[in-house]
Image (tube, helix red, strand yellow):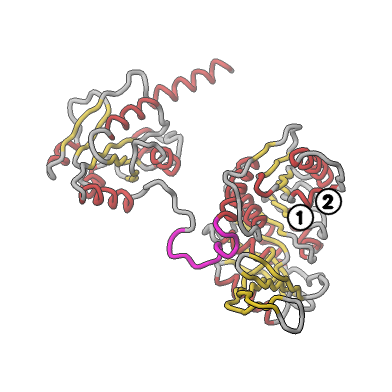
């Protein structure tokens, strides 16, 4: 299982409406109900947001045997979350928000005082022990206190991300990352001292890291980003990439889920925090939980780069439709250097768009040997697409670009270097295209760059 989330789940119900008058029998606004949206809250929302990544996600939680519990199971299962429910005495906790526009007028809580959940079956304990990563999403209602679950959390070798609650227990020792917000840090550390946000976050974060025996504590600071406190004395400050202005409900869940998924994929803690800050900021700026859970007819965050066969084909068709010239070039582009840049810029000047035909990872291995490429095709594609002289990138698996050239049919095929001829020339001539060479900068090549780096490393040793 890629990610196992452990924690308390609630049923969130948003009643959206408009206020046009005041009640005649009390000095209170009257909300005319227009629609109702139900969604999982607490650990359930973290699981739902994590499942949007396409990874396998399981949720270990406690659900009551009532209509609210049944509704939560339905919503989570429909989102692709595998639910492992412990029995919950009493009623399913609910939060009902009465909203007008972007404003919450009133919140009504149901479910009473937290009740300890029932026994955890062996299948649940094994699930936690065998996870690639675990996120404990504690909402202070008892799941994170469960003795059996805590034992399994202490035994797992998976990285643990712990999103704490002031009313919940301390994280298990050696949690990889704990993610309190600034207000929680003040309360949990008992730090009543003053100072800047950075000073408070660093002071409280380090105190909690030592108290909890955690690998790292990251203090989330809303629009100010996050402060990562680790074993070193100097914190890592990760600013938010954009000003987040909107509904922050669920931003902490987005942050923690993103960090846990990154650790499951092998990221360093610092890398996981940077990804989490970016994801939480984008989540708030794009409309928060309401926008995140709306059915989409297109990808939630389409990349600005034109990458892939569909994008390259559309671009070529658009350029030809307006009478333009389609230029293409190809290669491995394993370590992008100034020689590549010179070739790409020269090629772009020969027409109205430049499409790069990129050797896939398998193709590079076949040509260069098992140690190559140094960078994956996904990374190479994004770097190329980010250049202002590249308009699209298409990846091909074969040893030569002949197959992709056959359907792309560029007007000009460009090669960098001092070739006399290239095998693709005859193919390009079939549709009236031409092959040209552009100068290649002397002394600049991926092979020489790798050799220089290896020589420098050997010298330092």
Splitting the image into 4 quarters, where does residue 149 fall?
bottom right
Question: Who is closer to the viewer here, 299 or 402?
Answer: 299
Residue pointed to by mark 2: 188
Q: Quadrant of the C terminus?
A: top right
Q: Earlier in the sequence, mark 2 or mark 1?
A: 1
Is 170 within the magenta?
no
Question: Who is closer to the viewer here, 99 or 241?
Answer: 99
Identify the residue at horizontal 69%, vertical 78% (top origin): 22
What count of labels does the image hold?
2
- Drawn side of residue 384 relative to residue 219, left or right: left
Please state the horizontal and vertical placement of residue 345, each as a whole percent of the image: 31, 31
Q: Give the class, few, some or many, for how many residues have Cα within 10 Å of label 2's Cα (few <14, many ≥20).
A: some
Is 294 within the magenta?
yes
- Drawn side of residue 58 relative to residue 186, left or right: left
Q: Describe the element under mark 2 as helix, strand or loop.
A: helix
Marking on residue 112: none
Identify the residue at horizontal 18%, vertical 46% (top origin): 323
Marking on residue 164: 1
Q: Which residues are magenta?
A: 286-299
């Amino acid at each position: 299982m890629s990610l196992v989330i452990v924690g308390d789940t609630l049923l969130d119900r948003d009643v959206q409406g408009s206020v046009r008058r005041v009640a005649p029998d009390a000095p209170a606004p009257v909300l005319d109900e227009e629609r109702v949206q139900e969604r999982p809250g607490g650990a359930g929302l973290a699981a739902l947001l994590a499942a949007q990544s396409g990874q396998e996600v399981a949720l270990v939680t406690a659900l009551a045997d009532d209509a609210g519990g049944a509704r939560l199971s339905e919503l989570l299962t429909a989102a692709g979350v595998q639910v492992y429910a412990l029995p919950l005495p009493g009623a399913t906790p609910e939060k009902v928000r009465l909203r007008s526009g972007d404003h919450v007028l009133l919140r009504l809580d149901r479910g009473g005082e937290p009740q300890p959940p029932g026994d955890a079956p062996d299948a649940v304990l094994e699930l936690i022990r065998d996870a690639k990563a675990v996120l404990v999403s504690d909402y202070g209602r008892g799941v994170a206190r469960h003795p059996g679950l805590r034992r399994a959390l202490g035994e797992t070798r998976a990285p643990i991300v712990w999103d704490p609650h002031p009313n919940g227990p301390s994280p298990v020792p050696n949690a990889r990352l704990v993610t309190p917000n600034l207000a929680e840090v003040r309360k949990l550390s008992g730090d009543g001292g003053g100072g800047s946000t950075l000073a408070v976050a660093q002071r409280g974060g380090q105190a909690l890291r030592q108290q909890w025996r955690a690998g790292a504590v990251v203090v989330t600071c809303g629009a100010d980003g996050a402060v990562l406190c680790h074993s070193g004395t100097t914190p890592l400050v990760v600013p938010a990439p954009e000003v987040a202005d909107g509904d922050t409900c669920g931003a902490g869940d987005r942050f923690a889920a993103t960090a846990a998924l990154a650790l499951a994929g092998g990221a360093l803690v610092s890398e996981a925090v940077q990804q989490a800050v970016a994801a939480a900021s984008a989540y708030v700026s794009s409309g928060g939980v309401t926008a995140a859970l709306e059915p989409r007819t297109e990808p939630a965050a389409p990349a600005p780069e034109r990458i892939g066969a569909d994008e390259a084909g559309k671009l070529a068709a658009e350029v030809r439709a307006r009478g333009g010239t389609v230029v293409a070039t190809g290669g491995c582009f394993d370590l992008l250097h100034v020689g590549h840049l010179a070739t790409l810029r020269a090629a772009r000047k020969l027409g109205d768009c430049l499409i790069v035909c990129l050797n896939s990872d398998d193709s590079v291995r076949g040509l260069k040997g098992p140690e190559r490429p140094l960078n994956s095709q996904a990374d190479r594609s994004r770097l190329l697409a980010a250049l202002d002289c590249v308009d699209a990138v298409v990846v091909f698996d074969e040893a030569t670009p002949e197959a992709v050239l056959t359907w792309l049919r560029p007007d000009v095929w460009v090669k960098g270097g001092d070739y006399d001829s290239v095998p693709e020339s005859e193919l390009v001539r079939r549709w009236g295209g031409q092959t040209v060479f552009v100068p290649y900068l002397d002394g600049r090549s991926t092979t020489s760059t790798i050799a220089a780096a290896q020589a420098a490393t050997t010298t330092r040793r």
